[in-house]
Image: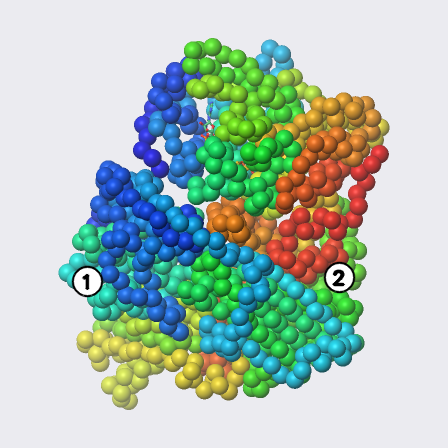
Amino acid sequence: MIGAGINRIDGPLKVTGRAAYSYERQDAGQPFYGFIRGAAIGKGKIAGIDTAEAEAAPGVRLVLTHRNVPKQGAFVNKPTIFDRPHPQLTSDRIEYFGEPVAFVVADTFERARAAAALVKVTYAREDGAFDLANHADRAEPQATLSIGLPGETRFGDLEAAMSAGPVTIDQTYTTPYHFSQPMEPHACLADWRDDHLTVYLATQTVAQNRIALAETLGLAADQVTVDAAFVGGGFGSKLYLHAEAVLAALAARELAHPVKVALTRRQVFTLTGHRPEMIHRVRLAATSDGQLTGLGHDVNLQAAVAEPWIEQAATVARSLYAAPNRLTRHSITNLDLKAAEAVRGPGELPGLLAFETAMDELANALDVDPVELRLKNDTAIDPELGVPLNGRRLADCLREGAKRFGWGQRPKTPGSRREGDHLVGYGMAVGIRMHFQGATGAVVRIDPDGRVIVRSDTPDIGTGTYTIAGQIAAEALGIGVNRVTVQLAHSDFPPSAGAGGSWGASNLSIAIDLACQKIRNKIVEAAGPGAAPNDILADVGRWFPEGVEATGQTIGQADDPNFKNYSQNTYGAAFAEVAVDIATGEVRLRRMTGVFAAGRIINAKTARSQLMGGMIWGVSSALHEAAHVDPRHGNWVNGDLAEYLMPVHADIPAIETVLLDDYDEHANHLGIKGVGELGVCGTGAAVSNAVFNATGIRVRDFPITLSKLLSGLPPMRTAA
Amino acid sequence: MKAFTYERPGSAAEAAAAAVRTPGAKFIAGGTNLLDLMKLQIETPTHLVDVNNIGLDRIEPTDQGGLRIGALVRNTDLAADPRIRRDYGVLSRAIVSGASGQLRNKATTAGNLLQRTRCPYFYDTDMPCNKRAPGSGCAAIGGLNANHAILGASEACIATHPSDMAVAMRALDANVETVAPSGASRSIPIADLHRLPGKTPHVETMLEPGELIAAVTLPKPRGGVQLYRKVRERASYAFATVSVALIAKIEEGRVTVDRLAFGGLAHKPWRVEQAERAVAGSDAAADSIADIVLAGARPAEQNAYKLPLVRRTLSATLEHAREGASR
Ligand SMILES: Cc1cc2nc3c(=O)[nH]c(=O)nc-3n(C[C@H](O)[C@H](O)[C@H](O)COP(=O)(O)OP(=O)(O)OC[C@H]3O[C@@H](n4cnc5c(N)ncnc54)[C@H](O)[C@@H]3O)c2cc1C
Ligand code: SF4
């Protein structure tokens, strides 16, 4: 059962429209609709706000501003991040463009939106700092990253290695702002009755957002119920509590009537978090046969004073390659933008885009095969932590990928292969992704009639969690998946660490398996020698007329010796072929192969979807994606999906996704790790390196758009 | 979105009359542009005159040997019409290079011609924009203007016209037939339909209030090799950075330019007849054409790359014409 690529058990509900997402839930009866009005400046004060016209508009029930908003709990910068209270409309200060200044509730969505536009706001605008490059001198070194790792690591003497050489790379790369932009915008339906708040919330973290919301509203946690039965994508952006949930809840309580709010697509840009822009300096020193003697990665990233998010971008090399002299450092530059947040592959996506592009520069400078360079610097021991790298199958990924892709056919000289109107190039890069473990509970119940119910508050954000939870329980109990009912993402169920960080599947699977083992033990105890372990359901009917239930608990990594004795990661290698139009510089992917080692795979189909989607993000990070801030105003200029480009179907040819047959005994007793983010790791660099191989042009300012290639392309016959 | 009233008249004349009866009225056809703009309150019509019931949804031969395309013909149907594909290939190619299949199924001939710019500041109602809010300034100047105009722009506005279809129609010397509220009809050469921004970028066409586009007529087929090359940052569903509509005659390996128009460069489809004349009859070289076309170019901060891009794309398109003919 584990490993089988079965279809999603919630698939029929989704394709027939019966899976109700937050905004579609009918549970609370006919709600009112809320609409958020955002600030039209990036920094300053609200000088005046006049709500009279909005209040008098048809159907309007409530207009909230900083002048009448109910008292809320203050923001607390807790290290646990996702349970931080996020009060709204707290003052006349504006700290980022689009920050909510008013919230209008009406009996229809259109009326709420129209009335929101009638709120008259005047501002006292202040000069802000909105662009990273021009304020890079403000960078402040960071001792600790948001996920708790050290901000700086130092071994040996990198400077000395750089001066000794003989071959060195010292380059600067910039990676832009990115957004998660899940298909389902952030939404909340809030229902307040009998002193209790129920929110149907698009979230990745039920227990954490419950605390965040309770603290914001000044309620006890048990006065809040969170239900996130179906979530349409998250990619990090739904880990956090955002304005829509807080404002819906405040209004529902004020009005004693259900209120629902969905962000508009433009508001998904202004009111949820972005991946910060980063300036990377990567240094590499090597012997002439390609042995790394030094590696360095310095990252300066945008942050906001209000809520610093120090992304772990310079950590990617820490466990990746051996080298005696090492230096990795993070700095932040506070700008007057919204606080950054985790976006799929935080740290790894931008970090590997820069670092693995630098490795390609080194291979080129050394004139060695980029695959050979990686193999040569592979290591079984974590070079910084000094413990074994469990499940280290980087070399297997490289060899398998090179073979499948036909790496041997690569153009050895950059810019040398022309096919018709195109320059063709091959590129490769490796990926590494830290594997985490967070405390997670699950309860498994077997009814006397043989129905098996699995419950946990872990949400399924579209990745297939319902299905794999069913598979794990089925395997552990020796029954068919069709016997298992999975219920997720409700705050009445055992709390989990949420769906994010590629840990949902392993956290939940371990908990379910432990619960099932307990049930088995209970049966054996009850039945004694009469037990029929091959028909567990019959046993339950016989020995437990009331049914039987057990809870399984996955411990957090701080308490798990595996995470002290080993350096836990997943691995991959990506190979890409691109064609660059010789006239226009348009880059198009031709094919791509990704080979991954991520422990035991629970469902071959859903895992492949995660990795393939991740690889497409990688392509996007290399060629398409960037959110632009206007440095005069501090706004997101291309804040819609027509202008914030990411690949469309026509950009993505066949992508080969290969999962090595794997089982990581040092990860956990099931051998499972995660795949949610691994696909974005290094795959962008494979594309960036292919562009170099095709053209001989190295673009270090991502994404690689055509205007950055144009001046380096071969001349064309334009004269008679 | 602001509340509005709605009607659905049964003929072109009624529609034109209805549009002036209610101040602030607008026509709606496929709605793929107008509704987006209404949701953002960039367009705030008080009344919608839905033209989907006025007929004008056919493609018919004209007495002059050309075709008359009804204003309500959907982009998909127009691009797929066998006569268009055979005799006006550049038009078919231009249309299918635009938007997406779903959008083209809804989008109409008239709506496509009158779609509004994609300048991102035009779309952000918190930003200054002379086109959206006359007199408020132009945020694109000095801002993000990588895909703005390099030709025909003004101090007030540097936006481009986003339509691909219109570029091909410009190359084909199409005429736009209209019906005024008075019932009078007229025919406007497509060259005159769209205006340059000048001091009044919010006035985008020479149409009078309530004037309805009834059809677009194409002159009789010109023959030749007809190509549309659209340069863009992703393979589909993106607006042109630069596009080239070319009609060329190929004789003995020589490419002679018959008609040539560009998209992505200006506030309207861009055609320089002088450049066509200058190279008439000779084997076309991109430089001699581009030198004339780009003579008055004034790039903004971020779009000077369009100058070499025009040259190179034109060169490649001429080469394609040459190869296409030899195949
Ligand atoms: C995401 C996206 C991507 C796109 N990409 C491209 C692209 O790459 N290339 C491209 O060319 N286009 C592109 N488009 C634009 C698309 O082609 C237009 O939206 C469409 O052609 C508009 O036609 P419509 O019938 O829907 O117009 P509507 O939205 O109904 O109307 C547009 C305008 O025309 C007016 N109007 C409509 N009919 C008449 C009439 N008969 N007489 C007078 N006025 C009239 C309306 O009042 C309105 O002002 C894209 C659109 C979107 C949303
Ligand atoms: S270029 Fe034109 S449309 Fe864009 S902001 Fe300036 S005035 Fe507005």
Q: Where is residue B196 in the image (x, y as percent from the top left)?
A: 58, 27
Cα–Cα gap, marks 2 and 1? 65 Å
Image position, residue A12 (x, y; %): 37, 54
Q: Quadrant of the N terminus of chain B?
A: top left
- In the foreground, A580 or A273: A273
Q: Position of residue A515 (x, y in %)?
A: 33, 78
State the residue position of label 1: A196
Residue at image x 75%, y 57%? Answer: A696
Vertical relation: A519 (above or below) B239: below
Please determine whether, in this image, residue B126 is positioned above or below residue A241. above
Q: Name the residue under label 2.
A: A409
Q: Which secondary structure, mark 2?
A: helix
Query: Is A644 left or right of A84, judged from the image as shown?
Result: right
**Host chain of mark 2:** A
Q: In this view, does A638 lie above or below B84?
A: below
Residue that appears at 64% across and 79% down: A326
Q: Position of A450 compared to A43: left or right? A: left
The answer to which quarter of the image holds residue A376 is bottom right
**Left or right: where B90 falls relative to A43:** right
- Count how many numbered circles sit on residues in the image: 2
